[in-house]
Image (cartoon, grey):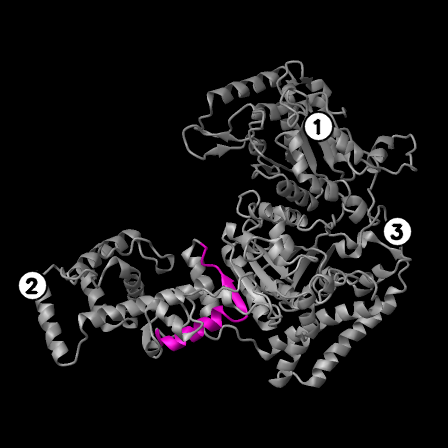
Amino acid sequence: MNHLKLFVAPLKWHGIKLLEKQDIARRVFLHGQRYVSSGTSEPFLSASNSNYVEEMYYAWLENPKSVHKSWDVFFQNANAGQAYDPHLPDQLERKASFLQSHGLAQTPGKAEKLVEDHLAVQSLIRAYQIRGHHVAQLDPLGILDADLDSFVPSDLITTIDKLGFYGLHESDLDKVFQLPTTTFIGGSENSLSLREIIKRLENTYCQHIGLEFMFINDVEQCQWIRQKFETPGVMKFTNEEKRTLLARLVRSMRFEDFLARKWSSEKRFGLEGCEVMIPALKTIIDKSSEMGIEYVIMGMPHRGRLNVLANVIRKELEQIFCQFDPKLEAADEGSGDVKYHLGMYHERINRATNKKITLSLMANPSHLEAVDPVVQGKTKAEQFYRGDTAGKKVMSILLHGDAAFAGQGVVYETFHLSDLPSYTTNGTIHVVVNNQIGFTTDPRMARSSPYPTDVARVVNAPIFHVNADDPEAVMYVCSVAAEWRNTFNKDVVVDLVCYRRRGHNEMDEPMFTQPLMYKQIHKQVPVLKKYADKLIADGTVTLQEFEEEIAKYDRICEEAYTRSKDNKILHIKHWLDSPWPGFFNVDGEPKSMSCPPTGISEDLLTHIGNVASSVPVKDFKIHAGLSRILRARLEMTKNRVVDWALAEYMAFGSFLKEGIHVRLSGQDVERGTFSHRHHVLHDQEVDKRTCVPMNHLWEQQAPYTVCNSSLSEYGVLGFELGFAMASPNALVCWEAQFGDFHNTAQCIIDQFISSGQAKWVRHNGIVLLLPHGMEGMGPEHSSARPERFLQMSNDDSDAYPEFSEQFEVSQLYECNWIVVNCSTPANYFHVLRRQILLPFRKPLIILTPKSLLRHPEAKSSFDEMVSGRSP
């Protein structure tokens, strides 16, 4: 039997030096051995009891009076390093006999039972922390288990007889037990009766909130969550907060009711059954604003989108209502999109904090979750341009449906970007509208995991499940989620377990496929009435005040409806989610139709070439093979010629001098798949020491970001597309490892890049670098599929620009994107330069070479790149 082994893992919040703890642990271990009787097979201080002793020890360190006197004496002697006394066991035995004879001490068996009972209570507490969510009352309908399993874990005390699992009995319920430091259910008390312990654990973990967090491998983070939810009395709201919550519920529900009355036969994908989502989002935004957030970027599917636009983003109601008018004429270019796909950008004052806040809801296609990486990319860009490296000013919120969150692979890809240095947004708050159905598909057929949110476990994101018919529980969870993100800069998931009062859309009949569920839904009292009745009953509001709040919002909707009839023209640009102030004229058109020459001075070419051929950091040892490459670059610069890699270097470098940020992302782009780029140098003698020469071109220059991505195309291309949305004054490039690999990102290409401007009047200058060439690598490595891009190219067949000096630029403006196959390095240089110098932004698809990267004939002279020259 192993004896006591304690205190080898430091707990951060105690601030104890590891070496000091190890020394104390050694002394406590030796001290404990004195009390081990050689005649017992299971010593009192054995390894099986070490966890409990460790808890007592940490409690004693914080406050010696918080533990029993016997533990206090034990730890004092251990810390003092008391010398071993061979007569001590005999002395203790005589003392114990004396105490027992006078009824002043327990027998060794009773003492061991006492410790075992304390250990059992500690295990019981841990069981609730780990598995309490399995029995939480999460379903508002009361008919489904949120985790798809009606099994009750045997270590949760749902009945008295289950105490036997821990070796406890009903007679132990009123015994008082010392609480471990890994729980906060005691509040200011250090010990509680077993009955009270179970009661408080059930209140915390088994009511309307289900917490999944014990898988997180950071003890401090687990302690933080425990304190937020276990501390008695934490979930209390003032009367003013309750009244605000009620008013927000009124707006959420009456908005849906108003649309249903006015346009009963229109699809709108209403929020009925999860009306609490509106106050939930507003709580997150209020709390985040309070902690310093100035800009919130959101992405969401169709469900409840109009309600979010109206009551969270605060889009003018008449602009929403006029979307239902089929006679409205479009004033802008393009096809437009259905109203529940449109985005919005709005700056306003947050009433809860009286601070300015900017809200952006990204437009998105019907392809569920496709917008996730786009939101993250735009958030990263906004943080980058503000110097917000810690994410304290800009944040993202992503809303999901339960079926899509579990089913769409891009969710997983996006999560795996969350902690990568060049992609992190310092934490995203995910809100899942878990209506327990996917169109007509039952959850048991839609996922293999217990919860739709289990994908979040891969990044140690805590998951807070909450019954959406308990508005106060939802508000508290959302407030904690905002604090978590601000404290730890990590993702967090709020799972709103709710229901869908109507079909998938308002014209759909759900009774065909979910008859029993919808029989219950038809009986379900709306959350607004439930909460209003509660507040009226406790005197927080009166019935008259409640009715006046309803009448007030109904009047606002009616007045907006009247004004909406005056709108005869639909302006899609009013729904723009990413405006570029000052880039276009007041009508949203280019300020000119001309493009300046794309060449640069020879001095500039020479300077960039020299830096590209050097190591601008002292005492930096590079690979011998790389030294040869740099010498070859220097020789080319002296001879006034460039190859493909050097032409790219010069185009990028010229932008940096002009203050244009350049970002290059993709798999292995730092070196280049074909080992031609080498934009990041690695010290051969110092691990992880790197140098990016392009960031050493000038003292005053824009930064250059080159970053190897995760092995993902869909997620990473979506991210870079979002990054390019934030500003027109940046060259954002994504490179496929081989051209054919872009097809795993086809959804981003089809739904955002090729058609985004037509649907949402959204310009974007993303650059796709696609290696192309039939060079013996087989059918999957040979072609960037240019025919697909050409097939998706589009312009107005009825409009043909007049021949003039502006003809070429006007022709490019009429296209949805630009597809090029450069034949020389100089072509490549000019095409990249033109991408920024054009008075508008179009996606640029470049078919780049493979063998030509090193072909001795594939070189261009400086003469083809100097000032005055263009492609």
| 412 or 684: nearer the viewer | 412
Rounded to the nearest whole Å, what is the CA distance between mark 3 and mark 2? 99 Å
Query: Looking at the picture, how far across and down is residue 428, in whole percent?
Result: 58, 54
Q: Which residue is mark 1?
A: 847
Q: Viewed as shown, does residue 552 lie left or right of 40? A: right
Callout 3 secondary element: loop
Rounded to the nearest whole Å, what is the CA distance between mark 1 and mark 3? 35 Å
| 56 or 136: nearer the viewer | 136
Q: Residues within 10 Å of mark 2 (few under 14, many from 20)?
A: few
Task: Say what amino acid the circle numbered 1 marks.
Answer: Leu
Q: Nearer the viewer, mark 1 or mark 3?
A: 1
Please, is residue 281 above or below residue 684 in the view?
A: below
Callout 2 secondary element: loop
| 218 or 403: nearer the viewer | 403
Please, is residue 805 above or below residue 718 in the view?
A: above
For the record, the magenta segment spans 191-216
Q: What number is the disc on residue 66?
A: none
Residue 121's image quarter?
Answer: bottom left
Q: Residues within 10 Å of mark 1 (few under 14, many from 20)?
A: many
Please, is residue 755 above or below residue 161 in the view?
A: above
Q: Viewed as shown, does residue 589 lie left or right of 388? A: right
Query: Looking at the picture, how far across and down is residue 505, in whole percent?
Result: 76, 60
- Position of the N terminus, as image quadrant, is bottom left
Q: Which residue is mark 2?
A: 87
Q: Which residue is mark 3?
A: 331
Task: Say what amino acid the circle numbered 3 marks.
Answer: Ala
Q: Viewed as shown, does residue 62 lie left or right of 76? A: right
